[in-house]
Image (spheres, coloured by chain):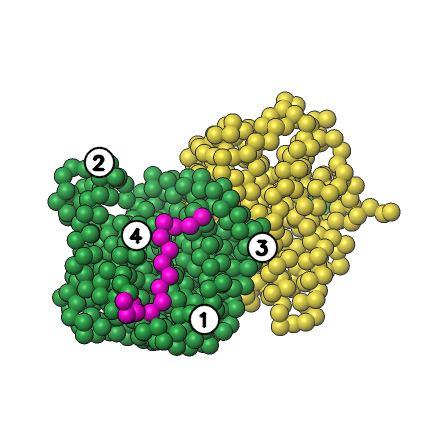
Amino acid sequence: MGKTRVSLFLPCLAETYFPEIGFDAIRLLEAAGCVVEYPQEQTCCGQPLHTEGSREGARAMARHFLAVFGKAECVVAPSGSCVLMVRKHYPELFAQDAGLRQMALELAARTFELSEFLAGRALPRLGLDPGGRATLHDSCQMLHGLGLAQEPRQLLGRVQNLELVEMERPGVCCGFGGTFMARFQALSLRMARDRLAQAAATGAGYLVMTEPGCMLNLRSAQAETQDAAGVEIVHLASLLAKGLDHV
Amino acid sequence: MFSPSPFRRAMGRGLGAEALGQTLTAGFYEGLPLRRAMAGELGEPEEVRDRAAEIRDRSLDNLEGLLLGLEARVRAAGGQVHWASNAAEANGYILDIAKENRVKTVVKGKSMTTEELGLNPVLEHAGIEVWETDLGEFIVQLAGERPFHIVGPAKHKTVAQVAELFRRRLGTGRLSQPEDLTRAARLFLRQRFLSADMGVSGANFAAAATGTLAVIENEGNIRLSTTLPRVHVAIMGIEKVVADMAELEYLLNLLPRWALGLRLTAYASLLTGAARAGEEGPQAFHLVLLDNYRARVWGSPYRQILRCIRCGVCHYACPVFRNIGGHAYPWVYNGPMGVVLTALSQGPPGRWRELLGACTHCGNCNEHCPVRIDLSGMIARLGAEAAAPPVKVAAAVTGTLAATAGGYAAARAGLGIYEAVNAPAQAEISMPGAAFGGPRRRLIRRAKRSFKQAFGLQGRGEK
């Protein structure tokens, strides 16, 4: 059996703010025995446009995505919301075009969020030295959109010397919400601070997430307010990749 | 420059009440296990939601027939039925009934539908005394406020605030215990129940097959309002009808469990028509069936919102509602269900762009809706219909929220999003109102090199 060929889709916020997520995702996927390619013509999936109500714009982005990834064996993205965009909204966007809709549906079935993809696969031993404690911030699109709550936790559970603790109230939105964060800044900050306080209260050293959007919001709130100052806000891919180094 | 919209100003006031936001958040999550357990007694929770949604959809699909059946049954039981196409008509009917019966005092059971109508000022203007008798509604009436939440109208008030309000408005002494305050309200209201000529109530559901209205409550005030006065007027939105008592029972079983974590409320009244000969109760019974937008929504792609059974849970599930509070919203219905109803009924959706944008699309409302309304999807769709607000791109200005917003603006030019996000000079996106949610946030800096640049430098680009 040949190795699975994975095309990496990197969310635009990771591309610009957190490029390390891309490298860490590649390392993990390769460690899981995949051959990884990164199609350089890729762009944003179009989610911001879709959320803002520009169906035309979103369709243009979706068409481009189909052109870039249409032939991929499978697509993996370190973001639940981008995957939700592809899986749920692309087929809706092409409701009037049977051919594109079919393509979108087929691609949707081969597109996976990173933890969803890795959870069912073997990885080398993962561990941390020194060990630590982590808490997971569920991204809303992962939790309510894709229904992926256990997958990232299962992966964190594979990291030796890493204790996973839950927040008192897991699964609460951090206040990112795409342009919501720009439009309603005080409200968004209030929501982010609630998450930081919850994370700090667990005593975790790592606040782990699967969404670059949440990461942008929470890291910005942390830098601005010094809330949860000692907590490292990190993408799941990066913490797992770190785990590859410590075994 | 920009001046903040009324919504933003109200939102700012709501955000100012930070302790309240924390109380609402804690209350929602602390109440979850009990509510889940109670709903779970009816069956596997997801199946319960399926069944409830199915009952509601079946009712909506047969709406006209069920309403005609309900009308016939209510008439047969000695009641009168009035069809009101809008608030003015409904208020007109109710006022006429009051005048015909020479009504001087009205006692009201809790009813959001009458809030929707703005009934109280209409009656008061005609010289009729109107008393809200639900304790929470009574408190907001005395305070001259709107209900904060559709189930908990005075949820925002502390005991101390209520004590001060009662001292000022009812002339009570300095009370501090909730029991004493409740007793004071009860003493005051008991006199009104006894002297009232007309009782006004809403209806949680109505069964077409028997012409029976169901109203549930915990305080007994609805029981009194609907049985003591000689005239009873019930107002219900046309979507509240179900086929028969079996369906009604299912929803009545579900509602208090879902909304409050209670197996049943202290009172559940099933009312069919006027009092018959030899029975105690109102001599005249009127049912006002209110359209006021519902028929239009029924015929639109948003019919699903009419499933709503007013449990009030989506409000508390919503992090925006919890943080800004019910009074930040422009209409009597607030929270996710209220945002949808406002955009559908109060003028063109374009008027509600900002309100519809105040959603992180987290989807928690959907997760907790007992009748599986796609609230989050509807808010997104209505927001899309309302069209995006104007965006200005001012180039080369520092301190940005450019990543998301930049993508947003640039993506208007199709695939230009990517170039914009990667543009070396940071572009600031200024959005009207962005500065009015309070102090501006500061974003962390972008990476020195984007992934693509770094990937290319590694020489992996050609792979």
- Chain B: drawing colour: green
> What amino acid does circle 2 point to?
Ser
Residues at marks 3 and 4, CA–CA distance in whole angstroms: 32 Å
Q: Whole-percent x and y of residue B340?
A: 43, 62
Toward the right, the furthest residue is A1
Residue type of the residue flagged with mark 3: Glu
Q: Pointer 3: what residue? A: B47
Chain A hue? Answer: yellow
- Span colored in magenta: B263-278
Q: Which residue is mark 4?
A: B220
B423 inside magenta stretch: no
Q: CA distance from mark 1 to mark 4?
A: 26 Å
Q: Which residue is mark 1?
A: B209
Give the image location of residue B200, x and y in percent: 27, 63
- In this view, the residue farthest toward the front is B278
Do the CB atoms of the residues marked 3 and 4 lie less than 8 Å apart? no
Viewer-proximal residue among B308 and B42: B42
Magenta highlight on residue B275 = yes
Q: Which mark is residue B176?
A: 2
Between the C-alphas of marks 1 and 2, the distance is: 48 Å
Q: Is residue A153 visible?
A: yes
How crowded pointer 1 is (Cα within 10 Å; few <14, some 14-19, many 20+) is rated as some
Secondary structure mostly seen in the magenta stretch: loop
Q: Mark 1 is on which residue type?
A: Ala
- Give residue B198's quadrant in the image: bottom left
What residue lies at 44% left-to-right and 39% top-to-bottom? B30
